[in-house]
Image (cartoon, helix red, strand yellow):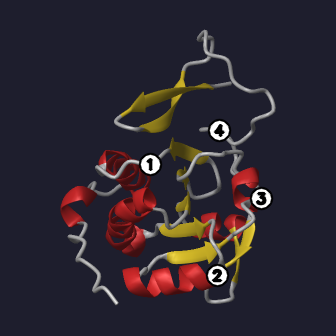
Amino acid sequence: MRFMKTIIAVGFALAVAVPAGSQEKQDPQKTVVVGAQAPEFKIKASDGKDLSLTELTAKGPVLVRLTCGCSGCDKELAYFQAINAAYKGKGLTTLAVFKEPQEKISEYAKQRNIEMVYAVDPKGESWKVFQTKAMPTNVLIEKGGRIASIAEGCDPSGILANMVSEKAAALLKTESVDVKQKAPEKKPQPKE
């Protein structure tokens, strides 16, 4: 059994595998950990389609991003859109789950030109399924459903997103993309 250790740096936390037998203790109730099978998870996407994590991971790796529209998550959005653009054609499915009302996210998605698959979960049930309270939380799941990495916390600098990008590239056996360089500069929104 592997234990998890949380590393905190630059305002975010990244869960990494620590060899069995270490002094770190893991919550025995927590089953959503690196190396474990991803939980059963179903949600309705913004286009009305029912999504099943089991069905998605049967096709290839999946990045589940539990997020919101706050200023920190908004600053990170460009990096995760760059991950989606870089690896979608190579088999990665990126699913953003927003803890906001549908009306707010529909407008937000239009303004930000969100191209990844997304859903809304205003009650936060997805956070319970993935056993986290952190906002955002990024769970990278291998084809077949094993959890490859969990990255928690907000990092507007892009360092965390680059770590996720490197792990996704490794799963896809392709060259890693520096999402900090690929992310478009955020253009100021016109004031109304």
**In contact (CB < 8 Å): disc 2 and disc 1:** no
Q: Is residue 97 above or below residue 145?
A: below
Q: Would you name the residue on which mark 2 appears?
A: 102
Q: Which of pointers 3 and 1 lies earlier in the amino acid sequence?
A: 3
Task: Identify the amino acid type marked 3.
Answer: Glu
Count of numbered labels shown in the rendering: 4
Residue at disc 4, secondary structure: loop
Mark 1 Cα shell of 10 Å, populated few (<14), some (14-19), many (≥20): many
User: In the drawing, what numbered circle is on residue 33?
Assistant: 4
Please identify, in this view, whether the residue under mark 2 or under mark 4 is nearer the observer: 2
Q: Quadrant of the C terminus?
A: bottom left
- Residue 179 visible, this angle: yes
Q: Dot 2: few (<14), some (14–19), or many (≥20) neighbours within 10 Å?
A: some
Q: Residue at x 33, y 62 (%)?
A: 79
Name which of mark 2 and mark 4 comes first in the sequence. 4
Q: Cα distance, mark 4 to mark 3?
A: 14 Å
Alpha carbon separation for disc pair 4 and 1: 19 Å
Tell me how far mark 3 sits from mark 1, CA to CA. Answer: 25 Å
- Are circles 2 and 4 on residues that touch, CB within 8 Å? no
Labels 3 & 1 near each other (Cβ < 8 A): no
The residue under label 4 is which amino acid type? Val
